[in-house]
């Protein structure tokens, strides 16, 4: 039996420890067999026994089989990357030049020496021997495709690095990416040469003590800080210990993560990479007959994170077929890896947006009445989510001791100082159920704000669960969610019988002038009209934030002075306004422009502008950005009928 080594299988430390004991016994019985010694050393090394124990094995091996290929290889492997190790490796190669076990080691040696021609030479030899399973090459191809142009990719270990070099050296794939193996970066001469060639700054902070145990984690943390103009990506095979200081700033974009101190739309990266760049057929069909314990099959579990993110995105955006396609792949991978029960449970919760939520006494019929029909399967809330509705949610979390979710969903007032802080506390004040009165909080009917994207998603999940568990509901099963951009814009536009999700591809009926009777409506091809506001039917397709009397029709950021004959200054409100303060669009939706910008299903994007945006940035086409919870971003809920 041959020990599964590099490029073949990945096993647990416990498995290798058991094999080390097994081969120790065999070594005593068959002390003259070089292959037995080689397996003994290999298992012990992967089991992470001490260097002293490894040295003893090599010493005993030298006494028993000193002239063997296996001894030269193990001696080179055990000695580190010095000249003595290189001579041992050359000796092994001279004995068996066709044995590919030396080729990967040569590649690493010549990488350290800066000899790319020789690294390429042995990469070609290794590739031609078909020693690297095709599945592992496929996996590492997708790793490279996860990295932006001219990016830097941190890797660790041979399995995660040598296949990348083969792809770059032999197949000429993504040579623009610089692979940084953090194990090799421990070598001072090599690290300095790489950093000098790549113009990478790395100044060890005297206040930080760099040790053998923390050096790699400091490299991963410090390089992006000291080189902000460069893009650093982190292979998903890096150890959790090494990325523990930066894990909260890592965004999965495929089979690698991108480090960013600011929130990024990593769903867009995942979609692009997995749907347009990745090779994925090998996950669906095991073309090469690789065992379930082969390295590539073990590594396939790293696809689960981006796949689940993608499936949730498609479910939330109503593209159920795409969601189910990705979920099927997730289930196949998880079954191979022994994680089927765990992933199935997660996906089943995701499919129904179900949490372990006890029932809460919501007025389901009243909720249904507040949603306006949009398509056959999609309804839209007539109002933005209010403080009262959101406080019901927070009260629920608090009553049921759901502290982890409460920490995600509670208001974020960290950016305020007095007196603004006191105002915001009063604006968002919540009362325990049963203690709230109609006049307890004058802002209850105002739109909620200062909540995160994740909080809005959790609110939708909670509302979904409460509705679906109710006996008083009209529909068997629904999903409450944030809309995608096209859904939001078309709903804001308010056209009931639209033929295209692109507004300018529709034809509408509208009056030509004020006073016209309904029968006098004319057809307007929107390819010839720029419609910016939801009141186009009432104001003859005019693109103006005011009516004929110069009164503002929404809550925007405008000057205090006004020509409105009512004497109202500006739009009548300093900050937000109560939901429904202005008349609705044709669908019956209030405040689709102005008041608060409304989140969509892409984190960091909100539509329609707000009280803090001028009218020209508060249109049905406006896509506003936000980095964190603030006083001008809220959300509106869409309801999708599933059954």
Image: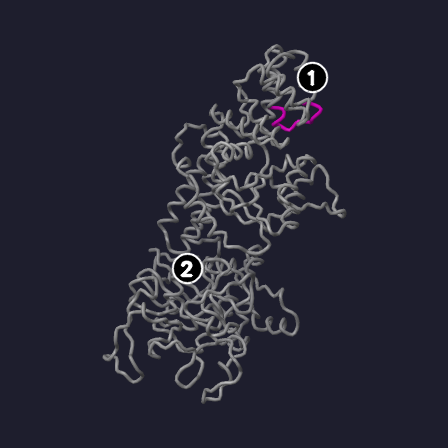
x%, y% of residue 599?
47, 63
Does residue 512 sit above or below 341 in this rendering? below
Does residue 225 sit above or below 1 in this rendering? below
x%, y% of residue 219?
66, 43
Q: Secondary structure at mark 1?
A: helix
Residue 23 colored magenta? no
x%, y% of residue 65?
63, 12
Mark 1 and mark 2: Cα distance apart in space: 65 Å
Res 235 → quadrant: top right
**Residue holding disc 2:** 484
Res 104 → quadrant: top right
Residue 48 colored magenta? yes
**Residue holding disc 1:** 59
Q: Main secondary structure of the magenta part?
A: helix
- Badge 1: how crowded within 10 Å, few (<14), some, or many (20+)? some
Left or right: 600 as drawn, with respect to 211 = left
Which numbered tag is attached to residue 431? none
x%, y% of residue 166?
51, 32
User: Start and end of the magenta stretch?
Assistant: 43-54
- Badge 2: how crowded within 10 Å, few (<14), some, or many (20+)? some
Does residue 288 sit above or below 465 in this rendering? above
Q: Secondary structure at mark 2?
A: loop
**Residue at the outermost left position:** 519
Q: Quarter of the image for the C terminus: give it.
A: bottom left
Q: Do the residues bearing badges 1 and 2 touch, measured as CB atoms within 8 Å? A: no
Left or right: 185 as drawn, with respect to 468 = right
Q: Residue shown at 60%/71% (left/top)?
A: 425
Marked residue nearer the N-terminal end (1 or 2): 1
Q: Residue shown at 61%/27% (left/top)?
A: 46
């Amino acid at each position: 039996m041959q020990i599964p080594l590099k490029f073949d299988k990945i096993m647990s430390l416990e498995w290798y420890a058991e094999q080390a004991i097994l081969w120790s016994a065999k070594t005593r019985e068959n002390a003259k067999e070089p292959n037995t010694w080689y397996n003994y050393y290999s298992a012990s090394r992967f089991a992470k026994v001490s260097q002293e124990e490894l040295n003893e094995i090599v010493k005993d091996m030298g006494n028993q089989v000193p002239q063997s290929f296996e001894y030269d290889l193990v001696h080179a492997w055990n000695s580190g990357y010095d000249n003595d190790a290189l001579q041992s490796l050359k000796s092994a190669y001279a004995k068996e030049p066709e044995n590919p076990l030396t080729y990967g080691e040569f590649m690493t040696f010549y990488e350290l020496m800066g000899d790319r021609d020789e690294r390429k030479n042995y990469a070609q030899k290794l590739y031609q021997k078909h020693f690297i399973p095709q599945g592992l090459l496929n996996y590492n191809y997708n790793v490279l495709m996860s990295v932006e142009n001219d990016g830097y990719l941190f890797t660790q270990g041979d399995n995660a690095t040598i296949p990348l070099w083969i792809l770059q050296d032999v197949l000429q794939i993504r040579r623009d990416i610089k692979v940084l193996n953090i194990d090799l970066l421990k070598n001072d001469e090599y690290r300095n040469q790489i950093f000098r060639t790549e113009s990478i700054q790395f100044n060890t902070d005297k206040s930080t003590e760099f040790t053998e145990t923390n050096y790699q984690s400091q490299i991963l943390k410090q390089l992006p800080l000291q080189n902000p103009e460069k893009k650093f990506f982190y292979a998903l095979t890096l150890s959790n210990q090494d990325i523990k200081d930066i894990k909260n700033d890592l965004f999965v974009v495929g089979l690698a993560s991108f480090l960013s101190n600011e929130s990024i739309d990593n769903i867009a990266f995942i979609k692009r990479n997995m749907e347009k760049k990745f090779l994925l057929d090998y996950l669906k069909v095991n073309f090469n007959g690789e065992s379930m314990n082969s390295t590539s099959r073990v590594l396939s579990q790293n696809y689960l994170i981006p796949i689940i993110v993608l499936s949730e995105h498609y479910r939330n955006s109503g593209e159920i077929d795409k969601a189910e396609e990705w979920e099927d792949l997730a289930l196949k991978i998880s079954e191979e890896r022994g994680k089927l029960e765990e992933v199935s449970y997660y996906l089943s919760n995701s499919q129904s947006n179900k949490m372990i939520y006890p029932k809460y006494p919501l007025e389901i019929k009243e909720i249904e009445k507040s949603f306006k029909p949009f398509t056959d399967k999609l309804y839209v809330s007539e109002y933005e989510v209010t403080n009262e509705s959101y406080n019901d949610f927070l009260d629920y979390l608090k009553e049921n001791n759901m502290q982890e979710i409460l920490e995600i969903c509670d208001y974020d007032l960290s950016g305020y100082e007095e007196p603004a802080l006191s105002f915001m506390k009063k604006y968002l004040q919540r009362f325990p159920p049963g203690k709230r009165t109609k006049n307890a909080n004058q802002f209850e009917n105002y739109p909620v704000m200062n909540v995160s994207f994740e909080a809005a998603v959790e609110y939708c999940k909670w509302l979904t669960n409460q509705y679906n568990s109710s006996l008083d509901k009209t529909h068997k099963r629904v999903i409450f969610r944030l809309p995608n951009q096209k859904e939001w814009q078309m709903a804001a536009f308010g056209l009931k019988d639209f033929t295209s999700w692109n507004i300018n591809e529709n034809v509408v009926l509208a009056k030509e002038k004020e006073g016209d009777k309904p029968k006098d409506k004319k057809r307007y091809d929107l390819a010839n009209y720029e419609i910016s506001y939801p009141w186009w039917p009432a104001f003859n397709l005019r693109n103006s934030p005011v009516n004929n009397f110069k009164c503002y029709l929404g809550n925007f950021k405008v000057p205090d002075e006004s020509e409105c004959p009512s004497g109202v200054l500006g739009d009548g409100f300093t900050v937000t306004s109560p939901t429904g303060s202005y008349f609705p669009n044709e669908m019956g939706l209030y405040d689709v422009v102005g008041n608060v910008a409304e989140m969509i299903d892409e984190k960091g994007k909100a539509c329609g502008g707000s009280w803090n945006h001028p009218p020209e940035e508060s249109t049905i086409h406006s896509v506003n950005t936000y980095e964190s919870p603030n006083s001008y971003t809220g959300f509106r809920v869409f309801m999708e009928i599933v059954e």
